[in-house]
Amino acid sequence: MIKELKVIQEECCTPSSKPTIDKAQADKAQELFAALADATRLSILSLLANSLEHEVCVCDITSSFSLAQPTISHHLRILRDAGLIKGDKRGKWVYYSLIKGRAEEIKIMVDQLLGSPEFALL
Amino acid sequence: MIKELKVIQEECCTPSSKPTIDKAQADKAQELFAALADATRLSILSLLANSLEHEVCVCDITSSFSLAQPTISHHLRILRDAGLIKGDKRGKWVYYSLIKGRAEEIKIMVDQLLGSPEFALL
DNA sequence: AAAATTGATTGACAAACTTCGATATGTATA
DNA sequence: TATACATATCGAAGTTTGTCAATCAATTTT
């Protein structure tokens, strides 16, 4: 009996048998979440999502924050590089808008990472 | 005619009328996404989500990566502080597991930020 | 054509983050 | 009780990130 208890305690746990995400997937997801990991950028996204025409020019984005114009430009670039927004230059102004379908893609990513009822069945 | 074109060009766009997320919400979301903005931490989450018992001890997590033990411990702390995982000490070992329901909460957050069909109707 | 305006880029700096070795703490074993 | 083991914490080194002033490029206005 004591011997059996010993054996149980000599192993901490049974290792996983299911495959986990690979490094390429993890790196890609990291890029996305890093773009979302800033309060200013999240506010910019919310601003675009809630604007009447779903399109806001840089001047209005800049005037919504107490940050210098190059700082906003920097944040817009990060969101653009992450494929979350796009900019459309018309005349003197650049109008930014959300890229559609990204919300769904992100939610699928969250399910793959943290598990969801559907993924749990696989 | 020319005058009318001038008037149109003197304003860049119509400002938003809908409310956007406030700073407190943005800060909270930033904390969460910052915890997800690292490939190692995403791999750890995936490891927990895909483990047979949905529970893995630190030793097995550590041996899954080419990183020093204090580094893994640091990442586990960040995930714990973000409310994504919990640790259960049993004897010599600490077993980590995902906190249930967080995936759904994150997906709702994404919808609020980037807009979703339901939120668009509001 | 010159001046003004919008937005992007560059370079610098401080703050935050990832990583590690050394060490501390708690538990089990001899 | 002394030793070995598992994990957390601390402090330091190197890297990345957020911010701004200065500058540049493109467009419009005068």
Image (cartoon, coloured by chain):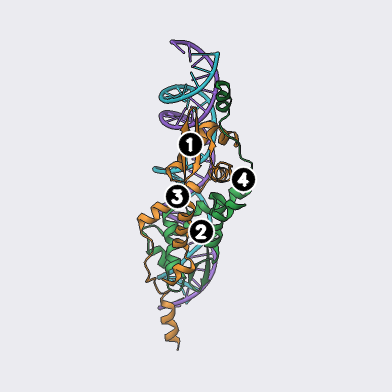
Chain colours: A green, B orange, C cyan, D purple
Residue B46 percent across, percent down from the top left: 57, 46
- The kind of residue on which mark 3 rests is Leu
Left/right of residue B120 with respect to residue A18 in the rendered view: left
The circle on residue B109 is: none
User: Looking at the image, is mark 2 or mark 4 earlier in the sequence?
Assistant: 4
- Whether residue A57 can be seen here: no
Instruction: Identify which residue is drawn at 46% across, 32% down.
Output: B89
Query: Which chain is home to disc 1?
Result: B
Q: Quadrant of the N terminus of chain B?
A: bottom left
- The kind of residue on which mark 4 rests is Thr
Same chain for the residues under marks 3 and 2 in the image: no
Same chain for the residues under marks 2 and 4 in the image: yes
Which of these two is toward me, A62 or B93? B93
Which of these two is toward me, A106 or A76? A106
Instruction: Identify which residue is drawn at 38% across, 61% down.
Output: B21
* Above/below status of D17 relative to A99: above
Q: Which residue is the site of mark 4?
A: A20
Residue B5 percent across, percent down from the top left: 45, 83
Q: Which residue is the site of mark 2?
A: A79
Q: CA distance from mark 3 to mark 2?
A: 17 Å
- The kind of residue on which mark 2 rests is Leu
Disc 2 residue crowd, few under 14, some 14–19, many 20+, Cα 10 Å: many
